[in-house]
Image (cartoon, grey):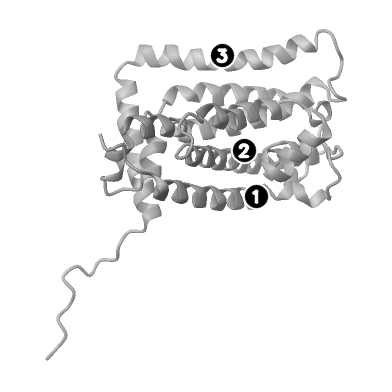
Amino acid sequence: MPEVPEAFPFPERSRLREGVRAYGLIMAMWVRSTMAYRASFAMTLFGDFAVTAFDFATILLMFTHVDALGGYTLPEIALLYGLSATAFGLCDLLLGSMDRVGRRVRDGTLDTLLVRPVPVLAQVAADRFALRRLGRITQGLLVLGYALVSLDIAWTPLKVLMLPMMVVSGAAIFGAVFVAGAAFQFVAQDASEVQNSFTYGGTTLLQYPPTIFAKDLVRGVTFVVPLAFVSWLPALYVLDREYPVDLPEWVAFLPPLVAVACWALAGLAWRTGLRAYRSTGS
């Protein structure tokens, strides 16, 4: 007797592909909702741009009294600022809702995400997708453009390629921190501010030169929570400056590998936290 073919011979979609598809659908829904009120969107976009611009305005005020900060000129700090702000802005746009996990655990609304046939991480990340966060990215790109025009850098093809690499890898590293912080909220539901200290606090830290911070802090953000790979280490290579700690020159090219390692650990933490979740029962 010949074999009967399978009723559904189609291959199953990978969870990654399904997650990306779900993320795109949820994001599109929120974008359509946002653009229904265009005047409101324009005002919130400008508000985000203006609020983040105050950070760089603070740096400009400092340079009205000093010629250098920690041995770095204004254009050099603008490069660090622009790279950090752009990378974080991109991450905040895509994953800025991850700090709501603790709230969902407390009020039981996470249960509604668990019964849907798509990855929970994609649903949480795309929830309340805020297009206004483009204001932060725009502001970071403008400061980065000012730095690139003002600096006299001995450009090579490798240094040119490092700029987009820093933005993409930096956004990925920040994203891994977002996901790891969200996983921690399964255990400590009121830990969103702890997460924000590493994400929002981390980008503020990276906007200033490493020379103004204590060595132990610099080692911590290099070897423990590797935020230094977002901008400090690769940017110092572009600027032909010494690294803040004794490291070989090739570490400037490690951000993509660091991002992959961070995401592997963050993914493990997320799965562990999700498995440990117990419904509120309400």
Residue 166, position as x, y percentages in the image: 65, 40
Residue corresponding to mark 2: 167
Q: Are marks 3 and 2 in contact (CB under 8 Å)?
A: no
Question: Which residue corresponds to the image point at 37% horizontal and 12% vertical from the top-left?
Answer: 40
**For residue 143, side relative to residue 190 (left or right):** right
Q: Nearer the viewer, mark 3 or mark 2?
A: 3
> Which is nearer the eye, 124 or 146?
124
* Mark 1 vs 2, N-terminal side: 2
State the residue lying farthest toward the front: 281
Residue corresponding to mark 3: 51
Q: Mark 3: which amino acid?
A: Val
Tag 2 secondary structure: helix
Residue 169 vertical placement versus 46 (above, below): below
Q: Are marks 3 and 1 in contact (CB under 8 Å)?
A: no
Q: Mark 1: which amino acid?
A: Val
Q: Mark 2: which amino acid?
A: Val
Label ID, residue 258: 1
Residue 200 vertical placement versus 49 (above, below): below
Q: Residues within 10 Å of mark 1 (few under 14, many from 20)?
A: many
Q: Residues within 10 Å of mark 2 (few under 14, many from 20)?
A: many
**For residue 70, side relative to residue 183 (left or right):** right
Question: Which residue corresponds to the image point at 46% horizontal and 17% vertical from the top-left?
Answer: 45
